[in-house]
């Protein structure tokens, strides 16, 4: 008997040759969470635990062809975007998303974990005006929300101001990730009416490469499985917290989170 296909999630993002972030992290998270992951590669990076040594974006026609190939034949229940590199790619992907009947999780990737730029400064306006209005959920960290809105967050009160400024750019929900604040790892999810504060203990582990990609992919996986936005984000937060706690050393720098951490629990 043929097994019924699991929900399908498409990541539109860059490749991380070190396997910790980008489409590699996205596909690992999707597999761990029971959905079928598919990918549209937007850029290729030479990247390891120490940083990004080089990045090369793909032509717009190659990105568009990958997207149409997957969506027109296989179909999607959710789409997640990551590194889009240039204004031309941002605008092409936004156009494709606007014509796709599926929830969209936008991770507005601006810089890598090591501080390397992954988005041209000239693309910021396209992210604001073209990409964010297509988002069911936008998931910026504090640096990214400052880039996009100018709001600098220094405490939990600032998360509200950042969320309001982000929502003004068009996403249905804003998930402002407060992981860079002191104290517990606290995020704010809001649609401008309802507020959901997500707290988790901060783990003393520097190996957190791929955290943002993994969280956004986990949210997309939850939406594809039929969860509503608050449920999908809450489940993603739990999954990522466990992945961070289990993050491991790799190479000479910052290692990745462990996408398969639930398989490694001692009680399994």
Image (spheres, rainbow, N blue to C red):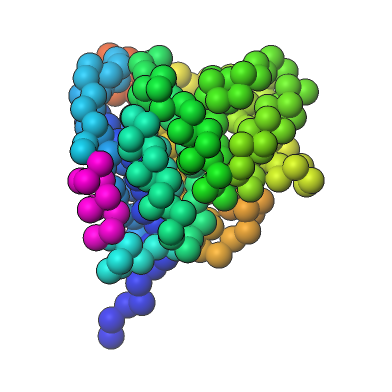
Using the rendered view, name the quadrant where residue 14 is placed. top left
Q: Position of residue 140 (x, y in %)?
A: 54, 31
Using the rendered view, name the quadrant where residue 58 is placed. top left
Of all residues, the one furthest to the bottom in this rendering is 1
The number of discs equals 0
Q: Position of residue 198 (x, y in %)?
A: 68, 38
Front-lying residue, 188 or 204 = 188
Residue 198 is at least partly visible in this image: no
Q: Position of residue 256 (x, y in %)?
A: 36, 29
* Residue drawn at (28%, 58%) of the image: 68
Q: Position of residue 72 (x, y in %)?
A: 30, 66
Q: Please check the rendered image and state whether residue 170 is part of the magenta-colored stretch, yes or no.
A: no
What main secondary structure does the magenta stretch of the protein show?
Answer: helix
The magenta segment: 60-69
Front-lying residue, 125 or 118 = 125
Residue 177 is at least partly visible in this image: yes
Above/below status of 44 relative to 106? above
Whether residue 158 sits left or right of residue 115 in the image: it is right
* Residue drawn at (29%, 15%) of the image: 50
* Residue drawn at (43%, 30%) of the image: 109
């Amino acid at each position: 008997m043929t097994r019924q296909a699991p929900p399908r999630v498409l990541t539109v993002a860059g490749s991380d040759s070190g396997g910790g972030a980008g489409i590699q992290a996205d596909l690992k998270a999707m597999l761990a969470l029971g959905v079928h992951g598919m990918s549209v590669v937007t850029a290729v990076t030479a990247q390891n635990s120490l940083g990004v040594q080089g990045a090369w974006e793909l032509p717009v026609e190659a990105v568009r062809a990958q997207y149409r190939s997957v969506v027109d034949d296989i179909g999607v229940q959710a789409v997640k975007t990551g590194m889009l590199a240039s204004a031309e790619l941002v605008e092409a992907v936004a156009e494709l998303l606007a014509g796709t009947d599926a929830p969209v999780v936008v991770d507005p990737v601006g810089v890598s974990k090591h501080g390397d730029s992954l988005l041209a400064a000239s693309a910021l306006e396209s992210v604001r005006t073209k990409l964010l209005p297509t988002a069911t959920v936008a998931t910026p960290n504090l640096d990214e929300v400052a880039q996009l809105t100018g709001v600098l967050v220094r405490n939990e009160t600032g998360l509200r101001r950042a969320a309001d400024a982000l929502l003004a750019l068009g996403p249905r929900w804003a998930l402002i990730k407060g992981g860079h604040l002191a104290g517990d790892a606290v995020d704010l999810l809001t649609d401008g009416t309802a507020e959901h504060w997500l707290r988790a203990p901060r783990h003393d582990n520097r190996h957190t490469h791929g955290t943002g990609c993994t969280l956004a992919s986990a949210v997309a996986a939850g939406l594809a499985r039929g969860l509503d936005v608050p449920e999908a984000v809450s489940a993603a937060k739990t999954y990522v917290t466990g992945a961070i706690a289990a993050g491991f050393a790799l190479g000479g720098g910052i290692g990745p989170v462990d996408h398969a951490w639930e398989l490694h629990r001692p009680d399994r």
